[in-house]
Image (tube, rainbow, N blue to C red):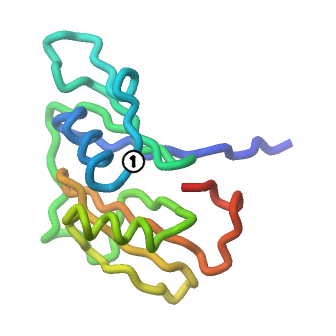
Amino acid sequence: MRPMLARVAPILGVPRVRQAAEYYRDVFGFELDPTAGVFQPDPGQPDGVYGIVNLGNASIHFQYRASFTAPSPTTRGDLERDAYVYVSDVHAIWRRLQEQAARIVQPLWLAPYGINECTVEDLNGYRISFGQPLDYEAGDRGQA
């Protein structure tokens, strides 16, 4: 019997974990547990070494990388992305992104593959897409 996939969470390497997690909370609307959201095992690492943010059933993890190099917008293609988050109301996400002055890479549009989506870039240069399939039914791809 084949094991079933439950969830996948990308792990993004960042120079400052807490700053990245708080950005996703404040700008993109993810949840960040104030106590357990950022793991700080060493007082010498005040920004933490690992963090997790959630949006419904979607999670994005952040891991401290001392030798972090930001993705370069000049060397990556327009369609390159680092994470894709399926949501139940992409229009609400889009409004929030605009209100919070997120860095828009691709405005909200209907992609030729039948998904309303938009793409933003975070403070470390990672590109995150939010999408809602036209035939979305609650529970099909998780809820946000």
Q: Amino acid at mark 1?
A: Phe
| Residue 68 position within the rendered picture, expressed as x and y whole percent measured from the top left | 16, 41
Q: Please name the residue shown 57% across and 65% down the image.
A: 88
The local secondary structure at tag 1 comes to loop
Q: Please name the residue shown 20% across and 57% down the image.
A: 125
**Nearer to me, 116 or 49:** 116
Q: Of all residues shown, which one is farthest toward the right?
A: 1
- In the picture provided, is 123 more to the left or to the right than 129? left
| Residue 19 position within the rendered picture, expressed as x and y whole percent measured from the top left | 19, 38
Q: Please name the residue shown 46% across and 43% down the image.
A: 54
- In the picture provided, is 26 more to the left or to the right than 94? left
Q: Please name the residue shown 38% across and 80% down the image.
A: 108
Q: Of all residues shown, which one is farthest toward the bottom?
A: 112
Rendered position, 75 above or below 30: below
State which quarter of the image contains the N terminus: top right
Number of residues whose C-alpha sits closer than 10 Å to that of mark 1, classed few (under 14), some (14–19) or many (20 or more):
many
| Residue 63 position within the rendered picture, expressed as x and y whole percent measured from the top left | 30, 33
